Image (spheres, grey):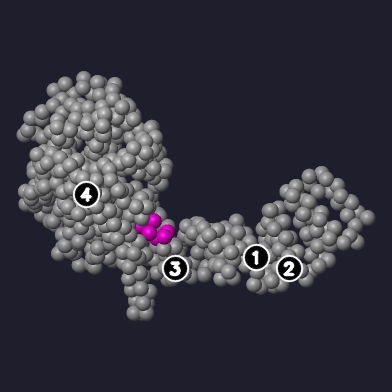
Amino acid sequence: MRRIVSRSGVGQLISAGQSPATLRQLADQARTRRDWNQAVFYRRLLCEKEDHRGGNWIQYGHALKEAGFHARAEQAYLHARELLPDNADLCLQLGHLAKIRGRFQDARMWFERALELKHDRVDEIAFELSLVKKVDTGVVYRESAVRSDPVPFRVFLSAPGGGFTESNRAAMTAGLGHGDYSYAFAMRGFVDALEALGVDHLVIKHPEYISDIRERSNAAVNIHLSFYPPERMRLLKGAYNVNCFAWEFDRLRLVGEVLSAHAFADQATMLDLADELWMPSAHGVASVAPALTKPIKVVPAPVLKDLVDAPRQGRVKPRDLEKGLRALSDVAWQPLAVLPRIQPQVNEGSQARQMRLQSVLDTYGSEDRTPIFVTIFNAHDYRKQIKPMLEGFLKFSRSHPGAILLCKMTTVDKHATVNEILLREQLIEADTLLPPMISERVWITRQVLTRPEMNALFDVADHYVCTSHAEGQNLPLIEAMGRGVVPVSVAGTAMDEYISEDTAVVVETERRPFSPRLTARYGLYGLETYFTSADRVQRALNRAVDLSDEDYAARSAAAWAMVKSHYGLERFKAAFDELTAKLLSPAKEA
């Protein structure tokens, strides 16, 4: 007899003549103790005695894998597969082992084989496949990628600020409010759609730094979905470049309007560098197509996640309000307080009255029911036309003193107070005296909200208010509609596709020439855009609160259905399938 000592220091007297049943029992006991070294030893003896039993080799592979001997575990599993070629669980285990070893294409192959063999853990395998597809795209940065098994196509995505997770407040804080940050939100919709379709994709930063993606990718066709305004557009060399961008005015900047000597300043020249252009609205396509030579089609950013399961049956219910207030308990709001001549002193008073939303409603809400309006805007974006919105709401609040307007403001200014930023960026005009705007009906926050907090903000709101001059798509408004909120909104430009009296309470507008302020900001001359006024906003707000529950429910249902159909997966899938079919066709290869 010989003495075997495990690393755990446990000694066992093992006889070479012990029966398989005894060895199996000892191996099971070692597994229970998670003593994988002893388990390996007993399983090996079992395999020597019963070489013909595939189950022994599977258990031997399990023990080797847990002990960290991954190459030997694979050998054991493959030997078992020679004995049990149709064992679905064995394929699943080989998939897990390949994933651990970083061989993601092999993992994908084994997981798919397990499904073909009718493994009953379908949901688990589907989840593993989704993970592998996300991770597998990282092989483009390995030199061995071009030697691995080829795939038909691979998708790369990029945006000015890169991608970020909306559950990560720090990452969002770094990007929100900076120029063109909204393109990252549009890219998120495309990423969601690619994940839903099970398409390999990778979000990259600085595509211009990659010399040729074909040297790194094993795909027959590489597709680059880029999300950039014209002046910041970046190409991925060796890929078919589709630039997805939004445009809200009636034309691009003319050559004579380009005052910069920068090489990227001419919009039409930059956009024509892409192979194809996708835009979120028919208005955008019609506006830019005359200046370009490349194909352009309407493909809006999909809105797939964070939608409610069904539209609202009426205004916000008390239970939903309470739930939303709990989710927003970390968000602080300050009252609107704008008085230009003594703004520094007013700022101090507003900051001192900062409070949570629950306290706002307890202190300033009506005894019966408080109508809650919400708006979201970038403080530095002149298109948002915030001044008539605030003036109109203040007029409206005189006859509806219980109403509350919540303003979620985004800004890169970390030092000035919210009211000072609002005054400087949205309200003050050189040729107009600004009257005081001090109200306990309007509350402002510039805190970064995570996606759950954004959803909660929509969920406590009866109406989303939008008074923009023009929009390329307006994702926050669409997302609010997807939560069942009935907008009080202007139409025009991209919003014509989803704002009507069926889906919203429409704010009246008129087309007028650009103001000097808009002309100076956007460098466009001789154009018109949509303007509204405080009186028009007031009338729309009055109509909104006068809606019956039945009318509210009908508009909520129409808005929700519009988002599901117009910004759903099928529309993106049709465009993406058309693109891949074109790029993979024999004519293209020739």
Dominant secondary structure (helix, strand or loop) of the stretch shown in magenta = helix
Question: Three-letter amino acid code at disc 2?
Answer: Gly
Determine the CA span between mark 2 and mark 4: 67 Å
Q: Is residue 16 left or right of residue 252?
A: right
Q: Can residue 466 be seen in this view?
A: no
Q: Are marks 3 and 1 in contact (CB under 8 Å)?
A: no
Mark 2 or 1, nearer chain start: 2
Q: Is residue 275 left or right of residue 431?
A: right
Q: What residue type is labelled 4?
A: Asp
Callout 2 touching callout 1 (CB < 8 Å): yes
In contact (CB < 8 Å): disc 1 and disc 4:
no
Task: Determine the residue positioned at 40% across, 54% down.
Answer: 204
Residue drawn at x 17%, y 33% is 400
- Indicate the quadrant where residue 358 lies: top left
**In the displayed structure, would residue 337 be above or below residue 466?**
above
Which residue carries the number 3 mark? Answer: 219
Q: Crowding near pointer 3: few (<14 within 10 Å), some, many (20+)?
A: many
- Sequence-first tag of 3 and 2: 2
Q: Does the magenta stretch include residue 192?
A: yes
Is label 2 in contact with label 4 (beta carbons under 8 Å)?
A: no
